[in-house]
Amino acid sequence: MAAVAANVAAAAEDQVPDREAVPDLESQWLQIENKKTGRDRPLRAGESWFLVKQPWYKQWEVYVQGGDKDSATFPGCIDNADLFEDQVNWHLKRGLVEGEDYVLLPEAAWHYLVNWYGLEHGQPPIERKVVELLGVQKIEVYPVELLLVRHSAMDTPYTAQFSHIDSVDLVLRTARERFLVNPQEETRLWIKNAEGSFERLCNTRVTLLEAALQTGQLVIMETRNKDGTWPSAQPPQVMNTAAEEDEEFQGQPGICGLTNLGNTCFMNSALQCLSNVPQLTDYFLKNRYLEELNFCNPLGMKGEIAEAYADLVKQAWSGHHRSIVPHVFKTKVGHFASQFLGYQQHDSQELLSFLLDGLHEDLNRVKKKEYVELCDAAGRPDQEVAQEAWQNHKRRNDSVIVDTFHGLFKSTLVCPDCGNVSVTFDPFCYLSVPLPVSHKRVMEVFFVSMDPRRKPEQHRLVVPKKGKISDLCVALAKHTGVSPERMMVADVFSHRFYKIYQLEESLNSILDRDDIFIYEVSGRSAIGENSREDVVLPIYLRERTPARDYNNSYYGLMLFGHPLLVSVPRDRLSWDALYHILLYRLSRYVTRPTSDDEDDGDEKADMEDKDGIPKPGRVAGASSQDSGPEQAGPSCGVAGGSRAPVDSSPGPSHWPQRARRKHLFTLQTVNSNGTSDRSTFNEDTHAQPYIAIDWEPEMKKRYYDEVEAEGYVKHDCVGYVLKKAPVRLQECIELFTTVETLEKENPWYCPTCKQHQLATKKLDLWMLPETLIIHLKRFSYTKFSREKLDTLVEFPIRDLDFSEFVIKPQNESAPELYKYDLIAVSNHYGGLRDGHYTTFACNKDSGQWHYFDDSSVSPVTENQIESKAAYVLFYQRQDVARRLQPQPGSRDPPVSPACGSPPSSEFMDVK
């Protein structure tokens, strides 16, 4: 008996039995009830089990155990009618209990019984899956019943049953079959939650259990429109109107603008460049990305960036849009990269870097990255080390972005102490090449002569970029004939001195937008040096303006005009003498009072004293009887530096009083901002004395000529322009591969010396990608300065040859592996603080170049592409271009990536 059972079990395991061979009753029992293939076998996840009505199975047991084939206990056909609610939809009754209402049989046992006894005509088999829930394997008797509907017909749901371990993709395929969707049409699923909200089922590779789908849940399938949009992406009220308009328009695919959402031209430029990379766009248009979406990559964006970019590409290349609004894409970018939140201007290359990295991680075919240890060359051949580095890179990074844009560097570091050489091979996604930088700098300054009759002169000076303030003075001396020792340099901002420079300070601290004034002073003068015979006083101009106050007794003071640096002889340091010195320095635009004005002033002298306005003797706003806030005595620091005048210098109470004299203005010591009076000075401080010339509004209007005061002349040198010779792109690449010494902030740890070293570093190109992105480093940032280099870089449209730069042994029989053709350019117009991004791109289908300026698109000729605005260049390898060309039998003729020249009258002038 045991031998028979073993033979039957061995022959029956997981096999469909032969309908013609019906074994004897004892063999039937052994095949159904054995522990290897029968009812008692262990459960295995994913396998199928079948429900059989328990009374029928008990009858069968009595029959086979009786041993008589002709017995009246023969069970007949398997009849599960009592397990169903109805015989139309064949839904299983709720609340059935195993052992009382049904028994469960494995797939092999079920097929044996059906072959031996048959199944009631018209009844479906009740198949159920084994699932693993919380680590326990069990048979799900009641599967998930989902209500499937189309987005366009939400009121006619179709009920379908799925196992908890079925994939969401099976749900999608079932819906597509049920609703007769064409294979070319793209669809996606949404579910309606209990709260009434809708949620995308992005990852179709997960199971229903992992997606938390439950019985009775509504699943909506939507189909992408012909114009590349999704029905759910548009409000219902505008959906029909927009669809009708898009259906009417039919243009060249890819010739589609992007609306500027507010300083998003940088994003539009990067997207247009990337959209015109043929192999990447085909990858999305042909839906190959759907199979490679990586939803579980911790370094990715859960596939959202890839899907948002795919939607954008499909809309742009549908041919149904003149322009599209990339609002959803902008929101996704801001969500995953907070630096791009809001609507500030950004760098197109920075966004491009983020987007390439995001697309790579979202489409990475490596689902679980393994740890890879980086190895140095250690004397091994470059070919071996490079192949190992590339294989290691591909073990963790394998996507369409790697296939299209990634190449390989050779990095060589040499220790300056021990001579240790470290060679590594590193992947790159784009080349950031420097531009040859001039060592000269052009600065605009205003020269203010000591001669009051001469207007300030505007000069344009050529100085060393890393020079000092003294170099600026030397350059100006060549134009003016004034010795550099008699010059003082100051930054003027908002009518005051922002900074007064020392001769040894670096020019890097001066920005191009700063207003630099260079003042002529006497050769004997200096600020803060008691040893010099003359003192240089900073002079501000202020006007009294009545301010609203409860008693109208307060007067505000407002700065105006250009400040001065005035040399004053130490032996003439009195308020009255200073008044006349300043009156002389201002004589070009300040009129002296006439004799009639003098008499008028005599008549009003006593009245002014009663009104609280300084008498003529109180030139500086102080008198011997008044020690209030307006007083300025010997401790005011006017004598220079931090010290009071020497004993021989009389104080204000002893300074000569000029009675009956009309003064145009008063003098007051102030702080460096010119906003508050300094009535007293501490002799132990080192505060620089500043003097304010305070004008009454009526006196200023009468004697001060504002037009003349603001006048200046331009020196002949202002017409000089530092000519920047154009550079070839090959020069930039040569500069990129030049040996350089590491900076102090970025030293290299030498494993031989066991310490950080400022090693020399050289980068070489080993392997180039199919599409090469070249970033021209036009923006220069240092501690003190920021500038944009507007050098014209001459780059070829066709046949950019890298054979001289690639150090990997080359295949001479395939020169096209090292030659590239231009396919797109990201442009930047303007300066650092403001600017505008646009794009030149070659359409992959027509071969025609177009100019993309946000929502505007215009055809252009090739001779318009090269300009000083070129910022990021996209080149495609020639062998790839030929591979992507249409086959000879296709309808469209082959097109070169950089060709196409319709009549010039149809092109816009982007210069």
Image (cartoon, rainbow, N blue to C red):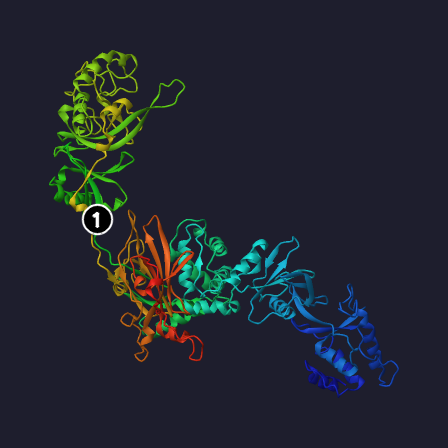
Please state which amino acid type lies under the numbered disc 1: Val
- Callout 1: SS: strand
| Badge 1: residue crowd in 10 Å (few <14, some 14–19, many ≥20) | some
In the picture, residue 522 is in which quadrant? top left
Kindly identify the residue that appears in the image at 22 percent across and 12 percent down.
603
Q: Is residue 363 above or below residue 12?
A: above
- For the C terminus, the image quarter is bottom left
In the rendered image, residue 511, in percent from the top left (x then y), is placed at 27, 45
Give the mark count.
Answer: 1
In the rendered image, residue 375, in percent from the top left (x then y), is placed at 37, 68
Q: Nearer the viewer, residue 168 or 579?
A: 579
Kindly identify the residue that appears in the image at 52 percent across and 59 percent down.
245
In the image, taking residue 61 as reference, residue 214 lies left or right, namely: left
In the picture, residue 642 is in which quadrant? top left
In the rendered image, residue 750, in percent from the top left (x then y), is placed at 31, 61
Q: Is residue 582 above or below residue 823?
A: above
Q: Is residue 157 above or below residue 110?
A: above
- Residue at far bottom of view: 20
Q: Nearer the viewer, residue 461 or 378?
A: 461
> From this viewpoint, is residue 53 visible?
yes
Q: Nearer the viewer, residue 709 or 569?
A: 709
> Mark 1 — residue?
442
Q: Nearer the viewer, residue 520 or 179?
A: 179
In the image, taking residue 391 as reference, residue 797 lies left or right, namely: left
